[in-house]
Image (spheres, rainbow, N blue to C red):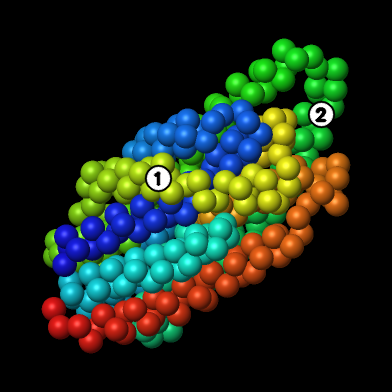
Amino acid sequence: MLVLTVIIGLATAYVNGMHDGGTIVATTVTSRIMKPRSAILLAGLACLLGSVLLGSAVQTTMVSGIVNSGAILAGGGKQAALFAVSAFLGSMVWNLITWAGRLPSSASHSLIGSMIGCSMAVCGMDSVIWSSVMLRVVAAMILSPLTGFALGFLLLKLQNRILRRGTIVWTQRVRALDIVSTFLLALSYGSNEAQKVAGVICLGALASGGGSPSDSLTLPYLPVSITSLCGLALAIGAMTGGFNMMRTVGRDIVKINTDRAFVSQLSSILVVEIANAAGLPISSTQVITGSVMGVGTEDRPRSMNWEILYKILAAWILTLPAAGLTGAVVIRLMILIPV
C-alpha cells in the first residue's frame, strides 16, 4: 500500500502542477515578456528546485496541523494508507473539474478539503483539528489573496511614481526583473505545493515503517527523495498542462502589461514566501489572482472582468466543502474494495 500511496501522491502532484502551473507565468506570457513554452520550462525547473531547497514547515503542518494524525495512525497501516490514497483521489477529482473549466481554484485547498472529508468519514468530526484549520487554512485563505491584492495595488503606485520619467532603458530592465521574479515565484510555489503532497504521503510512510502517532511530529520515515519526486511531478505537470490557466489569469481578469506583470509577480512572491516561513499551506493560485486584481484596479477598476472574477470567487468558496465531500465519498467506496 505504501508504493500505491506514493504513486497516487505523485499523480496528485502532477495534476496540481497541471492545474496551477500556468498561473505562475500567466502575466509574464500575456504581457509578451516571454514565450509560453520558455516561461513554462523556466517555471518547471524552478518548481523542482524549490521543492528541494526551501524548508519543510508546510509539510509539518500538513501532517500534524489539519487532522489528528494519531487517530489516523491508530487504525493501523491499512487505514493510514487508505486515508492518504483517498485524500489524493478526492483532491484530483475536484482539480480536474476546475481545470477543465479553466477556473483557477486552489489545488492546495482541494487536497486539504479532501483530507478533512476522509478523516471525518473514518474517524469522526473530532479527528479534525478545527482550531488549526480555521487559523492556518480558512483565515490564510481569506487574508493571502487580500494581502496580494493590497501589495499589488500599492507596489504598482510606488513603481509608477519612481519610474514616471523612466526611459525605454528602464522598461527593458523591468522586463529582465520580471523574468527573475517569475523564477523566484515558481521556486516558492514548488516548495509550498510539493510539501503538501509529501506531508500526506508521510502518514502512509509512518504507518508502513511501524511509526506511532507521536512520531508524526518528527517525520522520521520520509526521505528527501520523496519530496524531490513530488517536486519533479509538480514540474512536469506545470510544463505539460499549465497552458490552460494562462489566459484566465493573465488576460481574462484584466489586461496585463510589462509593468503590471512585474509588480504582480513581486507581490505574490512576498506573500508566498511569508507563508512558507510560517508553515501556512496557502494557495499560490489565489495569491497570484489577488495580485493581478490589485494591479488591475490601481488606475482603472472598470477594466476588470468582474464576471470571471465572480466565477473564480465561487470556485474558491466551493473548493473546501466540495473536495471534502468528494474525499468522504471516495474513502467510503475504497473501504468496500477488498485489499
Residue of label 2: 160
Which comes sooner in the sequence, label 1 or label 2? 2
Query: The disc labelled 1 sits on which kind of residue?
Result: Thr
Residue 102 sits in quarter: bottom right
Marks 1, 2: nearer the viewer: 1
What distance separates the C-alpha of mark 1 from that of mark 2?
Answer: 36 Å
Residue 214 visible in this rendered orientation of the protein: no
Residue 94 picture location, percent across and down: 46, 68
Residue 205 in the figure: left or right of residue 126: left
The quarter of the image holding the C terminus is bottom left
* Secondary structure of residue under mark 2: helix
Give me the residue at 42% from left, 77% from top: 326
Give me the residue at 62% from left, 52% from top: 248
Query: The disc labelled 2 sits on which kind of residue?
Result: Asn
Disc on res. 139: none
* Secondary structure of residue under mark 1: helix
Residue 217 in the figure: left or right of residue 273: left
Residue 242 picture location, percent across and down: 47, 47
The quarter of the image holding the N terminus is bottom left
Give me the residue at 85% from left, 52% from top: 302
Residue of label 1: 240
- Whether residue 192 is situated above or below residue 217 in the rendered picture: above
- Whether residue 212 is situated above or below residue 146 in the rendered picture: below
